[in-house]
């Protein structure tokens, strides 16, 4: 079996990168890596804000080697799925509802074709949107894995004041302008790498893909994105349907996360009827699946155990 590490900077030979067209005609860049021989099941993996699916090839290779077919797509407005701002380096969106509409339509087609148990995985913003889709009833997988899900934004002011400040600052002038210039969050001296992962080699994999495919690079979010992120996460945290959402969930929380709120994730987890929570401490930054081996291997192991018990034929 080929080592999953070999795929960190190479698209697998039998994987396909195509475009899927949303109902309104918008093309979303899509990745498919079908299982060989007898598929065990199908995984739909969705990354976070500014993510590209190339960042997760190492994890994909692990699950593919176990017989899973892997699918992912870049969210509208980022990666290879076009831009929603005149500035191609600004991550803009008018409403998170368009993400849900895209996911619902994609799920409708993909789930009808996917073989075996259907699993959705979401990292960060992807975790938020996947949980929203399940809570709102537009996606009904057999199991779901939420990795460092964005169920609240990391804010020194707390969620309420943070949202009010975002609306105050971002509501004046052009809300499609960048909310800040550099880094993943404003007013911090932390490097981008330290916010994402302690593993310098895995961090450099992302830089490799950005250098190889500069058209996929995305910079800071717009003020509108920040405002809508506060709103969407608040609405989800307060959604009474969380308590009746029946999909089995594995939630992986990085308690030292400086990009999303681990406290909000744990509060949401407490409302879900069928959830297992795995916590990491200061050893893990935001990108758990791209962390140093000790963290990453434990996370992958927990996911494998979850899939073995909750995503069987």
Image (cartoon, helix red, strand yellow):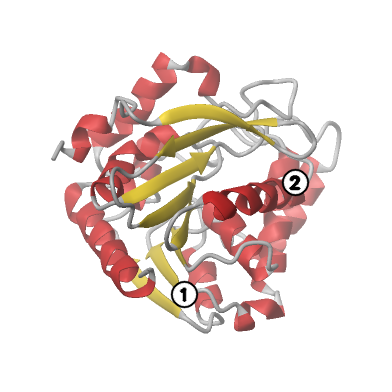
Camera-side residue: 293 or 118? 118
Numbered disc 1: secondary structure? loop
- Residue ranking furthest to the front: 37
- The quadrant in which the N terminus is found is top left
Quadrant of residue 84 within the rendered picture: top right
Instruction: Give residue 248's mark.
Output: 1
Depicted 136 relative to depicted 125: above or below: below
- The quadrant in which the C terminus is found is bottom left
For the point 61% across and 23% down, which residue is it?
A: 89
Depicted 280 relative to depicted 112: above or below: below
Residue 141 placement, left or right of 284: right
* Residue 297 place in picture, x, y as percent: 20, 55
Reading the image, the residue beneath label 2 is 98
Cα separation between marks 1 and 2:
25 Å
For the point 40% across and 15% down, which residue is it?
A: 212
Depicted 199 relative to depicted 293: above or below: above
Camera-side residue: 73 or 238? 73
For the point 44% across and 58% down, which residue is it?
A: 148
């Amino acid at each position: 079996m080929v080592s999953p590490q070999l795929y960190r900077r190479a698209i697998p030979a039998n994987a396909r990168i195509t475009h899927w067209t949303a109902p309104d005609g918008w093309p979303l860049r899509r990745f498919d890596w079908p299982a060989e021989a007898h598929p065990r099941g199908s995984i739909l993996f969705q990354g976070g804000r500014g993510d590209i699916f190339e960042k997760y090839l190492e994890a994909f290779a692990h699950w593919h080697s176990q017989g899973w077919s892997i699918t992912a797509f870049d969210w509208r407005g980022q990666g290879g799925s076009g831009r929603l701002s005149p500035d191609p380096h600004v991550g803009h969106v008018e409403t998170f509802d368009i993400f849900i509409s895209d996911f619902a339509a994609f799920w409708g087609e993909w789930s009808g074709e996917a073989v075996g148990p259907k699993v959705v995985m979401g990292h960060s913003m992807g975790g938020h949107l996947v949980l929203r889709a399940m809570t709102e009833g537009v996606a009904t997988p057999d199991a779901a894995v939420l990795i460092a899900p964005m169920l609240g934004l990391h804010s020194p002011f707390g969620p309420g004041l943070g949202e009010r400040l975002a609306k105050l600052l971002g509501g004046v002038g052009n809300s499609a302008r960048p909310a800040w210039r550099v880094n993943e969050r404003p007013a911090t001296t932390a490097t981008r790498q330290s916010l994402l992962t302690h593993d310098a080699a895995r961090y450099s994999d992302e830089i490799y893909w950005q250098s190889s495919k500069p058209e996929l690079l995305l910079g800071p979010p717009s003020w509108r994105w920040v405002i809508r992120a506060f709103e969407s996460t608040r609405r989800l945290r307060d959604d009474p349907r969380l308590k009746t959402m029946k999909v089995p969930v594995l939630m992986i929380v990085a308690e030292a996360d400086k990009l999303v709120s681990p406290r909000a994730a744990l509060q949401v987890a407490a409302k879900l009827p069928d959830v297992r929570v795995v916590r990491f401490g200061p050893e893990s930054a935001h990108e758990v699946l791209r962390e140093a081996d000790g963290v990453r291997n434990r996370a992958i192991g927990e996911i494998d155990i979850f899939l073995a018990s909750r995503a069987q034929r």
